[in-house]
Image (cartoon, rainbow, N blue to C red):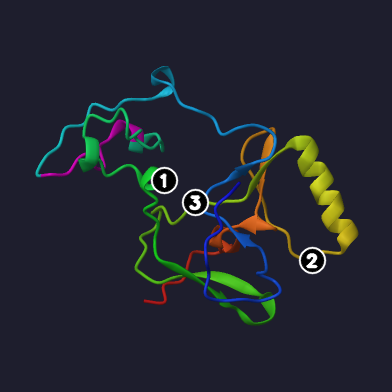
C-alpha cells in the first residue's frame, strides 16, 4: 500500500495518484545499518548542528537521524524530515504544467524529492513501450541508478514538473 496525498488542482495531464513516498515495484526499500551510515563529527553550536561545514553535507549526503551526533539540532535532514521548499504546479500555457517557487530559493538549494514508482531496468523498458503504445505524450522518468528508474507518470509528486530552467520565484 502507498499513501496518496490530496492536491487542490486537477487536469487531465495531472491525473495521477499523488504519493508521499516512493513505491518500490521489484524490491523492498533499502534498510540502513550502522555500517552503511556516514557519521559526521559536527557539534551543536547555539542550538544548531550540521551547518555548511558538515562532512555529510559537503559530499551531498544527508545525516541519518538515528546516528547524527547533533540529534534534533541537525540541519542536514531534509529528506527524512520532509523539509521541502514551498512550490506550486501551475499551467504554463501550451507547454502544460510547470513547477513554481512560492518562496525564495537560492542557487543550488534543495527543493524537493522526486517521487514515483521505482522500476528495475526490465520493468522500465516495458513501461516505456506500454506508454508509447498507449500514445502518451507526457511521461516522467528519472534515472535513479544504472539499474533503476523512477516513473512518476501514474504515481508521483510535483517533482515530476521539475523545471528545465532555474525555478521561477512567484513570491
Q: Quadrant of the C terminus?
A: bottom left
- Relative to 7, residue 40 above or below: above
Counting residues from the start of the chain, the first of labels 2 and 3 encountered is 3
Disc 2 from disc 1: Cα separation: 31 Å
Residue shown at 16%/32% (left/top)? 43
Specify whether 67 is left or right of 142: left
How far from the left and from the top, in percent, is residue 7? 53, 70
Counting residues from the start of the chain, the first of labels 2 and 1 encountered is 1
Residue shown at 56%/64% (left/top)? 163
* Circle 3 residue: 113
Find numbered disc 3 in the image and state the secondary structure of the residue it sits on.
loop
Disc 3 from disc 1: Cα separation: 7 Å
- Relative to 101, residue 84 above or below: above
How far from the left and from the top, in percent, is residue 104? 34, 67
- Relative to 144, residue 111 above or below: below
Q: Nearer the viewer, residue 8 or 127?
A: 8
Question: What span is in magenta?
Answer: 47-56
Find numbered disc 1 in the image and state the secondary structure of the residue it sits on.
helix
Amino acid at each position: 500500500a502507498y499513501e496518496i496525498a490530496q492536491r487542490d488542482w486537477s487536469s487531465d495531464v495531472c491525473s495521477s495518484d499523488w504519493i508521499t513516498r516512493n513505491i518500490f515495484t521489484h524490491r523492498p526499500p533499502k534498510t540502513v545499518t550502522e555500517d552503511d551510515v556516514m557519521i559526521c563529527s559536527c557539534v551543536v553550536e547555539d542550538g544548531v548542528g550540521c551547518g555548511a561545514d558538515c562532512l555529510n553535507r559537503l559530499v551531498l549526503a544527508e545525516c541519518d537521524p538515528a546516528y547524527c551526533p547533533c540529534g534534533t539540532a541537525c540541519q542536514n535532514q531534509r529528506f527524512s524530515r520532509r523539509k521541502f521548499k514551498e512550490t506550486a504546479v501551475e499551467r504554463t500555457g501550451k507547454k502544460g504544467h510547470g513547477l513554481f517557487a512560492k518562496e525564495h530559493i537560492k542557487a543550488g538549494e534543495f527543493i524537493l524529492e522526486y517521487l514515483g514508482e521505482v522500476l528495475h531496468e526490465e520493468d522500465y523498458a516495458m513501461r516505456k513501450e506500454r506508454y508509447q503504445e498507449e500514445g502518451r505524450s507526457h511521461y516522467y522518468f528519472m534515472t535513479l541508478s544504472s539499474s533503476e528508474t523512477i516513473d512518476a507518470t501514474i504515481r508521483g509528486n510535483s517533482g515530476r514538473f521539475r523545471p528545465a530552467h532555474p525555478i521561477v520565484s512567484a513570491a
